[in-house]
Image (cartoon, rainbow, N blue to C red):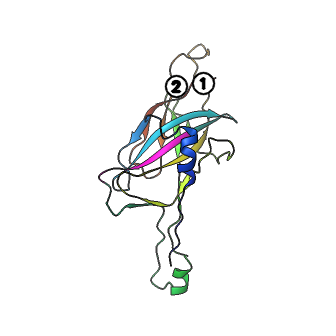
Amino acid sequence: MRKSLICLGGLLLSGALGLAQQASLGSAEITTWPGIKYEVIRLQRIAGDRLLVGIKLVATDHAPKSGTLIGVKVPVPSGASPEDIQLGRYDPKPFSLATSKITEEKTGQEYAAVPPLATGPQYIPGEIITTLVPGRSEILTVQFPLPPPPVDASGAPSREKQTVSLFLPNAKDPIAKIPLPPAN
């Protein structure tokens, strides 16, 4: 019997964070999953000079009615024993945002996702295994080091709005021109 993992954490916490109510800050319409798109729904500065990014995975009307697996398929070798299969050795693994990157658009500096600070009300896991059917969505978060503020030619803080491009796993293109939230 195959085991399934249902990730409810993102759904339960999304209301508390106000993530579900946020307007999209950008989206990647084309992913390697049929009918699935990413939406950036929140950018927030958090403790530790970090940037928290809320990502919504949305199954559009173009997603298969039977659903799209959001996970990593594990190939079953031709010589796999029935016991190994029953024990779940070849079950899909969770999909993760851990390989995501952002690029500060003015400098071109890249920042890799960092292990999350799993504290506070803003934490939602960055990995999931689920099946999304049309009209359904899930929320994940990923954290990055906060890019330093831009400076002008004289070295003074720039008044120009700082933007980043977000590169997400399985997205065909980056989500560009996402404005960073201002410093408090």
Q: Amino acid at mark 1?
A: Pro
Q: Are marks 2 and 1 in contact (CB under 8 Å)?
A: yes
Q: Which residue matches tag 2?
A: 162
* Residue 98 appears in the figure: no
Does 155 appear above or below 83? above
- Residue interval drawn in magenta: 53-62
Q: Which is more toward the observer, 117 or 131?
A: 131
Q: Name which residue lies at 50% across and 60% down.
A: 129
Decide: is 72 above or below 41: below
Q: Is the C terminus in the top left, top right, bottom left or bottom right quadrant?
A: top right
Res 149 seen here: yes
**Where's residue 2, x and y in %?**
50, 75
- SS of the residue under disc 1: loop
**For the point 58% across and 46% down, which residue is it?**
13
Above-or-below relation of 7 to 117: below
The residue that disc 1 covers is: 149
Callout 1: 10 Å neighbours few (<14), some, many (20+)? some
Left/right placement of residue 48 relative to residue 52 reads right
- Give the distance between the C-alpha atoms of the residues marked 2 and 1, in whole angstroms: 7 Å
Q: Position of residue 102 (x, y in %)?
A: 52, 39
Q: Quadrant of residue 142?
A: top right
Judged by its main secondary structure, the magenta piece is strand
